[in-house]
Image (cartoon, rainbow, N blue to C red):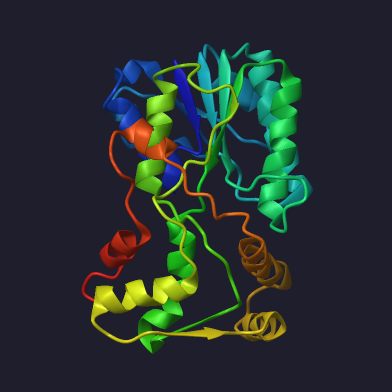
Amino acid sequence: MIIVTGATGKLGRRVVERLLERVPADRVGVSVRDPRGAQDLADRGVRVRQGSFDDPASLAHAFEGAAQVLLVSLDRLGEECVTGHRTAIDAAVKADVGRVLYTSQTGAAHDSRFQACRDHARTEDLLRASGLPWTALRNGFYAASALRFLEPARRSGDIALPADGPVAWTGHDDLAEATAAILTAEGRFEGPTPPLTGPAALDFDAVAESAARATGRPFTRTVVPDDAFREQSLARGVPAPVADLMLSIFAAARDGEFAAADPTLAGLTGREPASFPALLEDAWAGA
């Protein structure tokens, strides 16, 4: 039995679909906060159980009989995030899970400029201390994040963002396929994987060129000072912690934390991962 948490989210749902192409449905289970959102999976023979990272007993039930659990990282920050992950890891220990796979990130480190990467590093420490076999999937930065940053430029033609650095933006579909491949070849990686990334690292100057090719329209790249970007974000109603988090992504990128582009993802999927220009073109089709 392979259990996937967060199975109604962007990555978790894709992983379940890829697993169902590889193994019988009765070998796949999901742990979700609201089982009603996974009713279609239950109808296909997937074991659906309620599980909350705030409720240890529910996770123990959701993880029952699991050979492997894919722990999809929480959309939380700081102590709240790490506490939830600790609860899930403790539940996996109590359920005698054979292996835990965790969706970490390229750049995970205690001294990262990006809070989420510091949370990933602390979670990896918890896995290391758990006594369970574990794998940390060092996923490339999601391309969906770059597309959100670019949304205003889609209309204005001006990519007005803080100074950045190269990032190996990576698509959810490729990461889901690689995750399913690892889950169905148990033990392929011990501890952190190599970076699981798209084929090249791009800064937003290069992204502006890609946007121009994708749309046939000119795009400019304007560097906005960090303080001005924060003030603009607050003026648009962005909460201060979120504005600071966004700024930390650019600070980390400037330090090269997300610049690694590695062939491991291609090796797992058997194909070249989608490039960011291709993902941009798909997202902006008809723009």
128 relative to 286 in the view: left or right:
right
- Total marks drawn? 0
Give the residue displayed 51% in from the left and 59% down from the top. Answer: 167
The residue nearer to you, when weighing 65 against 115, is 115
105 relative to 110 in the view: left or right:
left
The residue nearer to you, when weighing 58 against 248, is 248
Q: Position of residue 118 (x, y in %)?
A: 72, 48
Determine if residue 41 is in view.
Answer: no
Residue, far left? 286
Q: Position of residue 241 (x, y in %)?
A: 72, 67
Q: Position of residue 248 (x, y in %)?
A: 68, 65
**Quadrant in the picture for residue 127:** top right
- Please determine whether, in this image, residue 166 is positioned above or below residue 67: below
Q: Quadrant of the C terminus?
A: bottom left
98 relative to 268 in the view: left or right:
right
Give the residue displayed 67% in from the left and 51% down from the top. Answer: 116
